[in-house]
Image: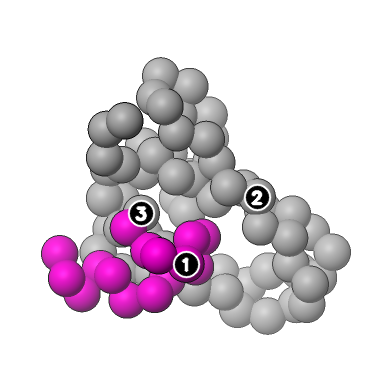
Amino acid sequence: MSDPVVAQKAPYAVDVEAGKSYFWCACGQSQSQPFCDGSHKTTDFTPLKFDASESTTIFFCGCKGSGNKPTCDGSHQKL
């Protein structure tokens, strides 16, 4: 399996709504970052579903290297 594309070296702050599902881009190729647009279909990656349990701001990983996917864990600081 190849490495994902680093979409950006910072998290994406997104206001999510309780009860909604979001599909985080794992390959880094989506033009709709941090969410999937189907670009992974030519890769071994699949998007990761995130179910919002509350309405809040979530910091989604932009570097695709987080150990706590789909949220940021600061891994981008090591790039």
User: Callout 3, which amino acid?
Assistant: Lys
**Who's the residue at 75% across and 77% down the image?**
55
Upstream in the sequence, badge 3 or badge 2?
Answer: 2
* Residue 9 at least partly seen: yes
Q: Quadrant of the C terminus?
A: bottom left
Residue carrying label 1? 68
Which residue is denoted by mark 2 in the rendering? 49
Residue 76 x/y as whole percent: 25, 68
Frontmost of labels 2 and 1 is: 1
Residues at marks 3 and 1, CA–CA distance in whole angstroms:
10 Å
N-terminal of the two: label 2 or label 1?
Answer: 2
Q: Residues within 10 Å of mark 3 (few under 14, many from 20)?
A: many
Q: Residue at x 26, y 40 (%)?
A: 3
Q: Which percent across, then down, holds residue 68?
A: 47, 67
Q: Determine crowd level at label 1: few under 14, some 14-19, many 20+ residues with C-alpha closer than 10 A.
A: few
Quarter that holds the N terminus: top left
Q: Nearer the viewer, residue 67 or 18?
A: 67
- Relative side of 74 to 37, left or right: left
Q: Nearer the viewer, residue 7 or 44?
A: 44
| SS at mark 2 in the image | strand
* Callout 3 touching callout 1 (CB < 8 Å): no
Q: Is residue 74 left or right of residue 47?
A: left
Find numbered disc 3 in the image and state the secondary structure of the residue it sits on: loop
Residue at x 36%, y 54% (from the top left corner) = 64
